[in-house]
Image (cartoon, helix red, strand yellow):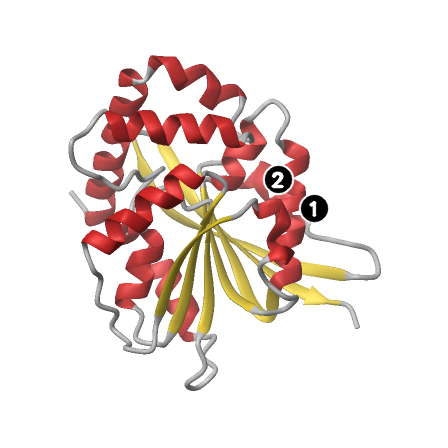
């Protein structure tokens, strides 16, 4: 079995097991994934079920997608200046800390989530288990942030890479989240540098996601975007994709 298949299988089993254990939050997750209270409840109950902290990964972990993330960073070097990386809707994923740990280039990794409970759990975990970065200049931070309001944390054209692993999927699949998903995308494009990229990891078919991205990632007279897709891998008949969106501001 390939490393990707193993990673996807382990992640799939953990997600399935978590959903089975937490019947009380299943309905909330399906219908209200755009709401802060849903995620506060999910992460609180998930943590209370175990005696030790474990990162919770939607879809898959870092090893499955490192070959999409790390090469993208290599193309955005600013010499000795820190590359700004955002793990958007991080939850308790290890994606952000892994980028911080493995990047040869100096990075400032911000792990942001709407749930203060998830952010607190990650902070406590990192404080108890110090990670040494590959580059001594790299920085790692965890912040509570509504990703529809990225411009409250970043100035325009200041971010080099945004990683979105399942966050947009959660918004698009919730009852009232589609409008918020479009707003998040537009916020991403405003804070990204012209050389920056948004990487969306999703199980949504390209026929649907590409059309949505190409429609939402345009703002007449303000910006347009380049959108592309690559296949990540397959698990039990479900194919996962990496959608890359690069802003092209209109001067």
For label 1, the residue is 216
Q: Which mark is residue 118?
A: none
Residue at screen point 16% across, 36% down: 52
Residue at screen point 53% across, 20% down: 31
Residue at screen point 32% across, 21% down: 19
For label 2, the residue is 181
Residue 224 position, x and y percent, is 72, 60
- For the residue pair 93 and 10, the one nearer the viewer reads as 93
Residue 97 position, x and y percent, is 31, 57
> Which secondary structure, mark 1?
helix
Residue at screen point 22% across, 62% down: 131
Q: Are marks 2 and 1 in contact (CB under 8 Å)?
A: yes
Judge depth for marks 2 and 1 and give the one in front: 2
> Which is more N-terminal, label 1 or label 2?
2
Within 10 Å of disc 1 (Cα), the crowding (few <14, some 14-19, many 20+) is some
Residue 164 position, x and y percent, is 47, 48
Can the viewer see residue 15? no
């Amino acid at each position: 079995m390939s490393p990707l298949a193993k990673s996807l299988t382990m992640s799939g089993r953990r997600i399935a097991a978590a959903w089975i254990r937490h019947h009380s939050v299943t309905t909330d997750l399906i219908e209200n994934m755009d709401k802060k209270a849903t995620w506060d409840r999910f992460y609180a109950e998930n943590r209370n079920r175990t005696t030790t902290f474990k990162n919770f990964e939607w879809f898959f972990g870092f090893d499955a997608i490192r070959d999409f993330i790390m090469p993208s960073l290599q193309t955005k070097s600013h010499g000795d200046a820190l590359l700004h990386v955002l793990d958007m809707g991080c939850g308790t994923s290890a994606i952000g800390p892994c980028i911080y740990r493995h990047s040869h280039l100096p990075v400032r990794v911000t792990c942001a989530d709407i749930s203060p409970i998830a952010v607190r759990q990650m902070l406590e975990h990192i404080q108890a288990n110090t990670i040494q970065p590959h580059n001594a200049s790299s920085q790692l931070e965890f912040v509570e942030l509504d990703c529809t309001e990225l411009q409250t944390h970043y100035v325009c054209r200041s971010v080099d890479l945004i990683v979105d692993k399942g966050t947009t999927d959660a918004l698009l699949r919730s009852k009232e989240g589609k409008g918020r998903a479009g707003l998040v995308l537009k916020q991403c494009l405003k804070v990204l540098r012209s050389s920056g990229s948004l990487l969306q990891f999703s199980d949504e078919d390209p026929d649907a996601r590409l059309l949505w991205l190409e429609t939402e990632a345009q703002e007449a007279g303000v910006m347009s975007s380049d959108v592309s897709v690559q296949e990540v891998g397959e698990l039990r008949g479900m194919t996962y994709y990496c959608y890359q969106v690069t802003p092209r501001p209109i001067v």
